[in-house]
Image: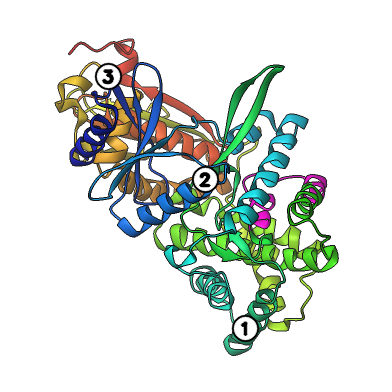
Amino acid sequence: MQEKLDSIKQLYKDWKGENVVSLDVLPQSGSERRYFRLYSKEVSVIGTYGANIKENETFIYFSRHFREKNLAVPEIFAINEKQDCYLQEDFGEISLLNRLEAERFTQPVYDLFKNSLEALAQLQIKGDEGLNYNLCLTNKEFGQQAIMADLLYFKYYFLDALRRPYDKQKLLDDFEALSTYLTHTEYKYFMFRDFQSRNILVTSRSRVRGLEEAVHFIDYQGGMKGAPQYDVASMLWQARANLPDEWKENLLVDYMNEFEKIINRPLDRNLFQSQYNGYVLIRLLQVLGAYGFRGLFERKAQFLTSIPLALKNLKKFFNTQSIGIVVPEFRKVLDLCVSDIVIEQFTPLQATDQTPLIVTINSFSYKVGIPADESGNGGGFVFDCRGILNPGRLDEFKPLTGRDKPVKDFIEQQTKMTDFLNSVFDVVDITIDNYLRRGFESLTVSFGCTGGQHRSVYAADALARHLRNKFKVKIELKHLVQEKKNWKNTP
């Protein structure tokens, strides 16, 4: 990590002619890229470190091409000689998903979705003009081969993991028929590929008559030439957004209106929407494949908890929409995936107000000793965090705790805490599910580290969040050392 920080700081100094005033390490997303927010006295910029040079080159090329056309993407300020670091415009931290989660289905949020789709149409059509698709990161075009890849991703990482019988050859034949059908579209422009509300940042810009909110796009380096409907499907059917049906219908019309305006000719709207439905299905299955890979194979808890949402989203679409082509074996497989028995398989049992179970989660210091079980039942779990690299050995972290951002950044970025906690979640989840079914009243889980200040605090908070989100169970969270010290630590 220090090498990455040094490279980013040096690039900033070369570009700005002065040292960075301060720097924040931003949370890591699903990729291997690392992001940093660098501050001068006046403004901030985003620094990116990526070891995949081809990916960097594609993003930088797309950004500069789109920027020349005044499209909603960041400006690239500087690139280092190795091309593993670059600086880009900072659009802040508020995504469209953040706004949706904070304000829900209000008119201002609808307007932001509409503005985003209008800006998307501009990006797809105007951005396509003169774009060199030979510089794409993977495929140059989202054609039959790429569509088949998404369908097979779903097959291998989700469907086959269900271990349910189906006719594999007939399914592959249906995959081929569907991918052929979707490939034959009149409209092919730049396709964002991962167009969803978390990749849209919202800022306010001053105008003579008040403030107007603007939308900006990030993470389009996986783009290629393809059907514009795919991006619209990605946004409107994002499981986490869970947009109302009326919004989906109206926003699709808003998008088609803008699309017609830019190409200056009418769409065959029936055909456009029929193929849109096919791309909705492709996108929903691709997402299920991703959740299956991350959750069922890599055992990452947050992706496992997303599977029921994705299945319910698929079921909602499947029961109300037509894709314009008959694919019988595919239909049988989808019927299986959205069946109650499969959805229940991935849906955790959840507590209610009447559920007696209370989970007590402690953080403690091994210097003081393992906390006693006050319930009188005995048992429970004690997890030793001392195998995780200790931030308390660094002077700058000595007065801080596992709830302070610098410590959390260190734990998340420079230790194996995430792997440790995924294993903890797997073990504790089995017991929680069993205790909920049997009507048990208490379970104690304790995390210990040397001083009860950094690692154990972070781990206890993480388990509390996980159990609340997954099981809605009542939690009593006790940070024994820190509460006794009133969260004040001397270096």
Query: Regarding mark 1 in the picture, which secondary structure is present there?
Result: helix
* Amino acid, disc 3: Leu
Residue at point 20%, 20% (across, down): 396
Work out how far the residue at label 1 is from the one at label 2, CA to CA, in angstroms: 39 Å
Image quarter where the N terminus lies is: top left
Q: Is residue 286 above or below residue 216?
A: below
Label placed on residue 200: none
In this view, the residue farthest toward the bottom is 169
Magenta region includes residue 119: no
The residue that label 3 is drawn on is 400
For residue 194, say whether it is visible: yes
Q: Position of residue 69 (x, y in %)?
A: 57, 46
Closest to the observer, 428 or 252 = 252
Q: Is residue 202 rendered to the left or right of residue 40?
A: right
Q: Which residue is mark 1?
A: 176
User: Residue at 81% of width from left, 62% of height from top?
Assistant: 267
Figure label count: 3
Which label lies toward us, 1 or 2? 2
Dot 3 or dot 2, earlier in sequence? 2
Location of residue 244 by image quarter: top right
What residue is disc 2 on? 68
Could you tell me which secondary element the residue under label 2 belongs to? helix
Residue mark closest to the camera, 3 vs 2: 2
Callout 3: helix, strand or loop? loop
